[in-house]
Amino acid sequence: MSNIRYLPTPYSYSSAVVAGEYAFIGLHRGFGDDFASQFHSAMAGLNETLARLELPLTAMVKVHVWLKAVQDLPTMETLFLDYFPAQRCPARMTATTEFFDRDCLLMIEGTAYCCP
């Protein structure tokens, strides 16, 4: 019997799936008029999902950030440290892509460790 736990969305993906000791976090996009606003909004959504799993943000061990524009990378680097201690950042990959929603400037997904 599987002990996989899903946090479904109204769409064709889950905001998180817990399997064993890990939570696989689906896309979290931000909303707002500029990159910083969208980044903070995406992180707030990520925090809400983790809270539903009773996990802190520091449980994130791997993060993948998708940017619409590579020029936003320096801003993202600075804002990232608002959420993670400099010496305890999760592993991260950042890439650029075109989004279906034209107003979307970034999406964040990743993996959290569920065990203390």
Image (cartoon, rainbow, N blue to C red):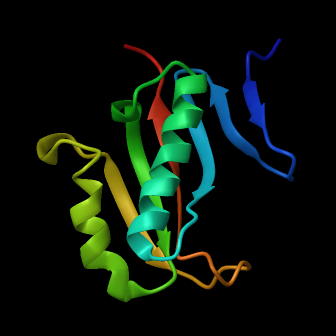
Q: Residue at 25% of width from left, 44% of height from top?
A: 84
For the residue pair 71 and 13, the one nearer the viewer reads as 71
For the residue pair 86 and 44, the one nearer the viewer reads as 44
Q: Position of residue 54 (x, y in %)?
A: 52, 18
Q: Position of residue 92 (x, y in %)?
A: 35, 57
For the image, the number of numbered tags is 0
The residue furthest left is: 87
Q: Quarter of the image for the N terminus: give it.
A: top right
Q: Residue at 73% of width from left, 23% of height from top?
A: 5
For the residue pair 1 and 85, the one nearer the viewer reads as 85
Q: Is residue 32 left or right of residue 59?
A: right
Q: Residue at 64% of width from left, 26% of height from top?
A: 19
Q: Position of residue 67 (x, y in %)?
A: 48, 76
Q: Quarter of the image for the C terminus: give it.
A: top left
Q: Residue at 59% of width from left, 43% of height from top?
A: 25
- In the rendered image of this protein, does residue 100 appear above or below residue 111? below
Q: Quadrant of residue 35?
A: bottom left
Q: Quadrant of residue 76?
A: bottom left
Q: Position of residue 110 (x, y in %)?
A: 50, 48
The residue furthest front is: 33
Q: Is residue 73 left or right of residue 3?
A: left
